[in-house]
Structures are given as C-alpha cells and as structure tokens.
Image (cartoon, grey):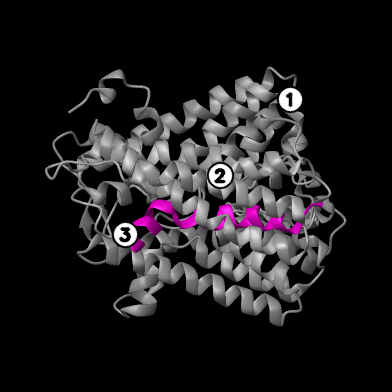
Amino acid sequence: MNHRLICRVIGIILSMEGLCMLAPALVSALYREHQMTMAFCFSAGICVVLGLPLFRVKTAEHDKLQARDGLLAVSFSWIVMSVFGAFPYWMSGCFASPVDALFESCSGFTTTGATLLAALETLPKGLLFWRSLTQWIGGMGVLVLTLALLPKMGTGSIYLLRAESPGPIKTKLVPKIGQSAKILYSIYLLLTAAEILCLRIAGMPWYDSIVHAMSTVATGGFSSRTASLGAYESLAVNVIVVVFMLLSSLNFAMLYFVLVKHTMRLRDNREIQIYFAILAGAVALITADLMLHSNLGGLESLGHAVFQTVSVSSTTAFVTADFGQWPAFSQMLLLVLMAIGGCAASTAGGIKVQRVALLFRIMYRQVYGLVHPRVVRTICVDGRRVEEPVLANVSLYFFAYIMIIIVMAAAASLDGHTLGTSLSAAIACVSNTGTGIELAGPTSTFNVFSAPTKLLLCVGMIAGRLEIVPVLLMFFPSVWARG
C-alpha cells in the first residue's frame, strides 16, 4: 500500500471539504444564524489545517497509484469526509450524540437520505443547506470532482475514478481521465441548474429550489420540509422532480453520447430499455393495487404510483404520500425497486439494472449449459462481449450485497424491531435509498435504532455507495502491506 499517495488524496479531500463548508457558512450568515456560521467556519478551518499538510506530503517520482491503492484511498476518503462533515451537525446542538451527527453526515455524503431529524422547518437554514450540499457532493463523487479540478494527480488516477463510479462495467468517456471527470460534472451541473430554474418557475422559493435540486440530481432525498415534497401540494413541482429524478437515474455516459455527441439514442441502450420496462410494470401494478385495496381513485392512484415508483427506483425517496400505509403488495414492489436501484454510471444507488440483467443472463447460461454442455455461450452488452472477470465480480457483488443486508437486518432486530422495520432499514441503507417501511418508513426517523446499530448502518451506507468491494478490501490484512 502506498501510504504517501493515499495521505495526499485524503489531504485533497479534506481541503476541498473545508472549502465546501464556506457555502453553508454564507447561507447561515445571510439568515443571521450566528452559531451555525461559527460552527461552519470552525469546521472548515479544521479541515483545511489538517488537509493541507497531508496534501503536501512528499512522494517519490516513481510513486503511482495501484488498483488496491485507489480502492483504499476512496474508502478512507469517504470515511474521513463523513467524520469531519459531522462536525457542523454536532456543533449545531441539534443532535443528541456524536454518533447521531455521524449518521446524518454519512447519510448525506452517501446520498442515502436516512435522517434522525424531525420538524425540519424549525432547524437552521444553513444546516439544512449543508445536508443537501453533502448529498450533491457525494452524488457524483468528490473524487470525480477532484480529478476534474486536479487532473494531474499522477499515473493511476483511473483507479480513483473506477472505484467511485457505480456500475459493473467501467469506461472512460474520452482518453484523458481529467476530461472525462469534467464532462461528468458538466452534465451534473447542467441538470442541477436546470432543475433550480424549473422549480423556481413552478413557484418554489429560491432557497427551497436550490436545496431540492441538489438532493434530486444527487438522488439523495433530503428536503427542507418535514412532509418532503408533499408539503408543497403542487402538481408542477412533482412533475419537475419526477423528470429530474428519472434523468439522474440514467447512465450519465449515455446522456453524454445522446445529448452532446449525438451518436446514440436512449432507446438503443439495453439497460435503459430494461429500466423503463421495470418502471412501467411497477407503475401499472401499484396503480391497480391502490385502486383495488385503497380509497384512492384512478388518477390519484396513478399519480402516486408514478411519483413513488420513480422516486424509490432512483433511490431518491422523496415522498408525496405515506406509502407505509399502502397495501402490502405495493410496499413489497417498492422494496424490490429499492434493491434494484437505477442504471449504472448514474447517481442512483442499489444493485443497478445492468447487474440485475447480467445476473439473469448468468443464471440462464448456467442452466442452458446443463442442457447443452458442449455449447459455449458468451454474454454481450450492447454488442460488446462482457469479460468473465466482470461477470465474476457481478456475482461477488450480489452475494456480498445480500450478506451485508442479512447481517445489518439481524443487528437491527436486536433492538427489538419487527422483520419489516429491520429488513427495510438494511435495504434502505445499503441501497442508499434512505426510507423503508414500518418504523423505518417515510413518516419516521432512524432514531428508533440504538447507537451501535446506527454505526453499523453507517458502514452499510458507505459500503453501498462505494459498491462494497472497496470497503471489504479494508478487512484483508495483506492489503495493508507496503508495496
């Protein structure tokens, strides 16, 4: 392990986090929240004071990041970022313990959206702005931003991009890493700015528009209202948010080739075809279930079904209705959508549609091989053959995903909660969705869990955001050896 290069990466992240804290400090100053202004300034100072010396750690000319170094650097960066991002929460006095502040910070940076806060309207504006900003920073990935701003990080930077970019198949948009990162962030910024403008035109105040746009494009789900988007009771706002949640859950590389290069159409991508088919099927089934087993009419059922299906599948988890009170079949469908998540190379969480499709094709190939043992079948995605190591990694990821959820659900059940609460909370955290059912539902907070369970859920959130492998790597002693 190359300790010096990893320290340098962490130093860059800490310094950039400190600079990012100046934005909510300014918001707090504008709203005359003096305590929060000081809290953000103090936290920013700590980040910069500790980050700059690490950034200036001397490295040898021949030093370069290897694959394991990139994975470890990403894991450490997210842990450090979450810990120091908890400082403003703890100093605000809104949290009962440092563990609660860390939970909120992890939930923000991982774009999970699980919260311990209630009565959001009474909280400082600067604090709510920081919550959404952490989701926006974590949505595309702070290391992707680092590569965009500091492209000359040395040979091996590709491993940082690959470790933080979601999806089983990693590709660069253009030959240069820094340029690829800039393209991704340009799309990210464009979507954010466009949604802010649309929400403002729809009648939402500037502050709320910015907060909700950052959370939407990051597929995070933090709101400035306790009732989430349901507080606005606006069809225009709901439609705008649905559109941008859907765009943010699509493959950003595909958006680049469609919108910028004009070399592809969305319907030409197999993953997006499958994703839209899943959404359409879920909307139809939930609408029918609500019409048959609730007091909602046809149009109202369809409206709620469309919003919550897109919201949950994109792992944003904004709410316009308490789906915890919906029929059991609809809740089960929403839990499945949480687990699947959005497309690869998007800001959405979950297993990813591409992985699910590959898992079904792996299963079919294995069963087909039993019937026709002499036939060799290859698996292709959009005309390209998927290498066997990639297929093996998909199977590894799915197994690890299931095992982590089982462990976390078992731990949550030790707090005395039901299977529905424990299992949905585990799925919500590992899939970075942030809301489940029963006591982990949209009208509740995660305060129902004990401090040890909250810490375990934090691990699950980071593991889910980094797609498990970088976090698992930290538990292998051989990885820590120098060299």
CA distance for labels 2 and 3:
28 Å
Mark 2 or mark 1: whose residue is earlier in sequence? 1
Q: Residue at x 78, y 47 (%)?
A: 326
- Residue 8 versus residue 429: which sits nearer the camera? 8
Q: What stretch is highlighted in magenta?
A: 123-149
Q: Indicate the amino acid at tag 2.
A: Asn
Query: Is residue 302 in view from this perspective?
Result: no
Membership of 13 in magenta stretch? no
Q: Indicate the amino acid at tag 3.
A: Leu
CA distance for labels 2 and 1:
21 Å
Residue occupied by mark 3: 150
CA distance for labels 1 and 3:
48 Å
Provide the secondary structure element on which disc 3 rests.
Answer: loop
Q: Which residue is drawn at 68% across and 24% down?
A: 451
- Residue 213 versus residue 76: which sits nearer the camera? 76
Residue occupied by mark 2: 432
Provide the secondary structure element on which disc 1 rests.
Answer: loop
Q: Tell which residue pokes out farthest to the right in this image.
A: 295
Residue occupied by mark 1: 418
- Left or right: 259 with respect to 454? left
Q: Residue at x 76, y 36 (%)?
A: 438
Query: Is 51 placed above or below 380 here?
Result: above
Q: Indicate the amino acid at tag 1.
A: Thr
Query: Is 200 placed above or below 29 here?
Result: below
Q: Residue 313's x, y, as percent? A: 57, 53
Mark 2 or mark 3: whose residue is earlier in sequence? 3
Q: Residue 331's x, y, as percent? A: 70, 44
Which secondary structure class fits the magenta region best?
A: helix
